[in-house]
Image (spheres, helix red, strand yellow):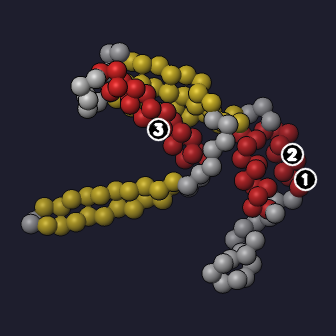
Amino acid sequence: MTDTATGGKITSTKEIDNRIISQLRTEWETENLVASGSAPVVKKYNDPVRDKELARRGALLDAQRNLAAKVSTIRLTATVIMSDLMATDFAQSRLDAVLQDVTVLAETFNEEAQRWDVTVQMPKVKLLKVVEEVNH
């Protein structure tokens, strides 16, 4: 792998030999990464069914994002803007990850809280594809 900016070899990437990858494949074959997410129902439309479905989709995205956070790095950026003696804070996060074969374990609707809760999983062995691609 080469650094496109300098054309040189990237020294911060540590190559993992095939023996270690094989060992991890055996250890991780039956293991899963699990994450949960939730989202409240917001009365945005005149259709309660649509609002509830949007909350379900939001909970699924939240669960996927939480799963991605387990396998990747989150970059945070914070900005404070001062105008007319009033401060406004902005926070932004960025997450880059590859998720493969994610399945939904559970989807439940909490009627009292008007909130969807979703739990997802991904086979841990799928992380090795990323390691193998970086290695070769």
- Horizontal placement of 5 versus 22: left or right? left
When the figure is inspected, residue 11 is found, relative to residue 95, above or below; the finding is below
Residue at the spot x=63%, y=44% of the render?
99
Q: Disc 3 marks which amino acid?
A: Asp
Determine the CA span between mark 3 and mark 2. 32 Å
Q: Nearer the viewer, residue 17 or 7?
A: 7
Label 1 vs 3, first from the N-terminus: 1
Q: CA distance from mark 1 to mark 3?
A: 36 Å
Q: Secondary structure at mark 3?
A: helix
Residue at the disc numbered 3: 62
Q: Which residue is mark 2?
A: 23
Calculate the distance from the C-alpha at mark 2 to the C-alpha at mark 1.
6 Å
Q: Position of residue 19 (x, y in %)?
A: 90, 53
Can you name the residue that lies furthest to the top here? 111
The amino acid on which the numbered mark 1 sits, given as a three-letter code, is Arg
Q: Residue placed at 68% from the left, 77% from the top?
A: 3
Which residue carries the number 1 mark?
A: 19
Task: State the mark number for residue 40.
Answer: none
